Image (tube, rainbow, N blue to C red):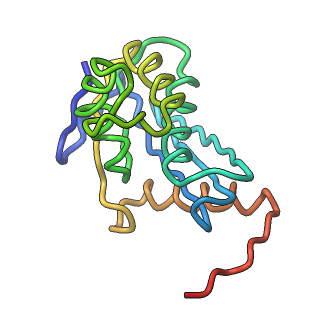
Amino acid sequence: MDKVTPGGDTRDDDVVLIWTDGGCKPNPGPGGWAALLQFRGQEREITGGEAETTNNRMELTAVAEALASLKRPCKVILHSDSQYVCNGMTRWSTGWVRRKWRNASGDPVANMDLWQRLLDLAPRHDITWQWVRGHAGDENNERVDVLATQARDALGIAYPSRRK
């Protein structure tokens, strides 16, 4: 069902292309997430933010909101610069479920609520999980990075910078 490919998109009219990103500053702190969906020449941007969160929660939320916005089962190529998201969906989640939501160390899985939401949403679609290196020139990855930052900044929460 879900797979990771190291490169090369298959672009055709029946595929929804999705790019997602999320982040926080500071981490934890105010965060934003964004997704860009492309289908048959149309584009849609969705964004949001939370006042107190983590970067991983924002990455997961971006993916969940993108998948939830699809109105019918689709073939999807989902691009994320988060290895946490891609590995979680393709490698780790099966073990978490088998171990009753414990990780390999026996500790509770972080962000279990969002992982469970993703595991509910993902089977509706034929998803290829495409990891992309962040800040490496992928135009749409850079675009969702900017949108996620704008969503965070729109919260209007100023945190003092932390000194080392």
The percent position of residue 78, horizontal first and vertical second, equals: 37, 37
- Residue 56: horizontal and vertical position, in percent? 48, 49
Relative depth, front residue between 109 and 18: 109
| Viewer-side residue, 121 vs 27 | 27
Name of the residue lying farthest toward the front = 106
- Which residue appears at 41% of the width and 29% of the height? 16
Residue situated furthest bottom in the rendering: 164
Q: In this view, does 162 lie above or below 121?
A: below
Q: Quadrant of residue 147?
A: bottom right
How far across and how far down the image is residue 29, in percent?
A: 66, 60
Q: Which residue is drawn at 37% across and 62% down?
A: 134
Residue 76 shown left or right of residue 160 in the figure: left
Quadrant the N terminus occupies: top left
- Which of the image's four quarters has the C terminus? bottom right
Quadrant of residue 68 in the image? top right
Please state if 53 lies on the left or on the right of 113 as rendered. Answer: right
Q: Residue 72, how many percent across, how many down?
A: 49, 12
Q: In the rendered view, would you say 117 is above or below 25?
A: above
**Residue at x 35%, y 29% (from the top left corner):** 102
Task: Tell me if 8 is positioned left or right of 12 in this view.
Answer: left
Q: Is residue 39 left or right of residue 11?
A: right
In this picture, is 115 found above or below 82? above
Residue farthest to the right? 156
Q: Residue at x 50, y 37 (%)?
A: 111
